[in-house]
Amino acid sequence: MFSLNELNPEQRTAAQTIEGPVLILAGAGSGKTKTVTFRIAHMVRNLGIPAEQILAVSFTNKAAKEMKERTEKILGRHAARGLTLSTFHSLGIQILKEDIVKLGYQRNFTIYDTNDQMAIIREGLKNLRTDKKSFDKKAIQSKISLLKNNGIEVGDFKRSRFFDPLSEYDLVTEHIYQFYQERLHFYNAIDFDDILLLVVKLFRKFPEVATKYSERFRYLMIDEYQDTNGLQFELVKGLTSAHQNICVVGDDDQSIYAFRGADITNILNFEKIFQNTKIIKLEQNYRSTPAILGLANPIIKNSRNRKDKTMFSRQAPGEKPLLWLTLDSTHEAQIVVEDIINYQKEGRPLNEVAILYRSNMQAPVLEDQLRLSMVPYRMIGGQKLYDKKEVKDIISYLSVIRNPNDQISLRRIINIPNRGIGTATLAKILDLTQQKKVTFLKAMNELGQQDDTKFKNFDKLIYHYQNQFKTQPLHTALKELIAEIDYYSFIDKSYDSAQQAGFRKLDIEHLILSAERFVNRFQSDATLENFLEKILLADSQDNKNEHEEEKKNEITMMTLHSSKGLEFNRVYLVGVEEEILPHKKSIDDGDVDEERRLCYVGVTRAKHNLIMTCTKQRVLYGKTVPRNRSRFLVEISKDLYTEQDRTTFGHMSAEEAQEYKTNFFSDLIKNI
């Protein structure tokens, strides 16, 4: 017999309840994966249920892999061989490979990626005989994806709530959607969003297909059920058409993906849809201290629509969460990074630390401070500022101004913005550098004397800004350079939508602000050379960390959405302010429940230490605005956290605080 003694009483009940519908409400850190794997082992070992009759579905390949590895460790590979542990989409492909012929496709269908999708949309816009640059191909692709994820096929679009007859984009999308699906079918191809849509279509048109799979998989388990959408719900209904042996595991308090189509009512109404459901609550938390849960529970209890549960921990009480009041985003970043440095000095590994934020727009100033302090980091759910295409363009200009012999950077910017230099001209320049053993820039100059229309004033630009960066503040010269090359107009011409261009311009603004912060901190040492060295040195160090142990010695930065399922000893939850958390859009819409769940997810990522921050003012969309702490903190007792006003640096006088800041920045300069 397989023993369930390692499980607590509620986990054991969940593992032993096999027949009929079961809803396991698994709170944060409650050991749900262990419960599910022990449940599978109990079914196979103790009840003799054939492994082939068990299907467990999760959302990510990582989660499916972890479940498979844990189950194989318990059962052994041989006993676990017949189990189907899959993601929704992997299961969908398996079903389509068997039965897609019923929908008029061949079994050897191809799954198209984003580039393939864009190629068809581009072709469709040409056939529409309209200016393809007037329409954002990505926006059309996103709208088609939205429609498919809501189960809306081509013929249903006009009658759906997603169609606006006054929207030119929707009228174009209707045409492109039709063209797109015809092309896919002609190519015997589907896209990623088609996988579940076609399976549900199969189950609707051919109920016997749904019955076949329901009889094949007599026992169904769904993980993260709060994240299921309408199509996934229909798929689950089809898989239970021959029985009601369904066990779903989830936490409505961690439903944070409505923007992806997740429907929280799937878990809230589960027992109404599946009669005689047994509900089991896993409320013991094995991750966080009672002090952290003491903050998390009252935050989430104010949610309007939720199933009642209260998380508890049997660990030692732990330290109260902290709320640091800071001056602005720059000061916020400074004290967070300073605290991380002190944590590291205590001999603690950096991989125990995470900085969480509501929006990627909060990241650049934090990223700057980490770079300045030489604290290694990795970013999840967002691209590093200095890795972004437009930012790299401008950095390449700076590199050429600093070193005209930098051929790699020069080749990157030679036609940015467009100077009419094609591959043939580029080949001439490269040939000349080889023949005359001259630099790339000198070869350009020589060719420019023959045909100055393509290279007019380029060398003058470089030499002029060599002087400008010596005589003007770094950020001032940088602004002038960007204006001189008319880079914002180049961005406008490079993207189909004003929104996309706006985001790219914002990245450049962040680079300028980064340079300005560098000047404010390092004064006379804020040279172009030092600025580039700081950026490139950090990148070089990142690239050299090839050994796994070195890779692990870095903090993690990510959005709250990306943090779900992860845990860290020390968590910095930055920007716990109105209009950030909760987000302004949710406040304007009058529904902050999902924002509250996001806050709850962030708080419960912390195992031992939670530090929240709130600024007195913050620059948002180019304006400095006063800030107020989040309603999620205002609503609960102040006794649940310790508030510290860091704007006065503790009990220091103004003079002592200034001296402290001066010494702090002097130490940073010494490390450059």
Image (tube, rainbow, N blue to C red):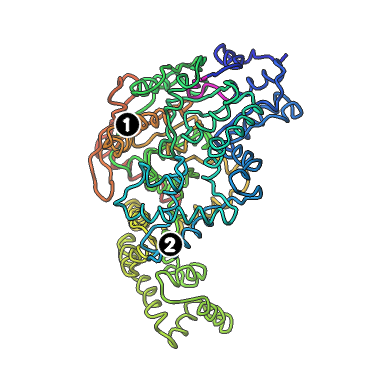
Q: Position of residue 267 (x, y in %)?
A: 46, 25
Q: Is residue 519 visible?
A: no
Q: Is residue 183 left or right of residue 481?
A: right
What residue is drawn where x is 45% and y is 69%? 413
Assign the N terminus to one quadrant of the image: top right
How far apart are the two marked residues, 2 and 1, measured between alpha carbons? 39 Å
- Assign a secondary structure to mark 1: loop
Residue under the point 51% across and 29% down: 224
Q: Is residue 29 above or below residue 656?
A: above
Label 1 amino acid? Val
Q: Considering only vertical position in the picture, is 85 above or below 32?
A: below
Query: Residue 16: x percent and y percent?
Result: 61, 14
Residue designated by label 1: 592
Q: Residue 102: where, in percent of width, then height?
A: 61, 43
Coordinates of residue 544 in the picture (x, y in percent): 58, 52
What residue does disc 2 label?
A: 125
Task: Name the one closer to the observer, 394 or 501.
Answer: 501
Viewed as shown, does residue 204 lie left or right of 519?
Answer: right
In the image, 397 versus 251, the foreground residue is 251
Considering only vertical position in the picture, is 370 above or below 262?
A: below
Mark 2 neighbour class, 10 Å CA radius: few under 14, some 14 to 19, many 20 or more: many
Q: Nearer the viewer, residue 139 or 202?
A: 202
User: Which residues make up the magenta segment?
Assistant: 23-33
In this view of the protein, which residue sits in the foreground, 122 or 160? 160
Three-letter code, disc 2: Leu
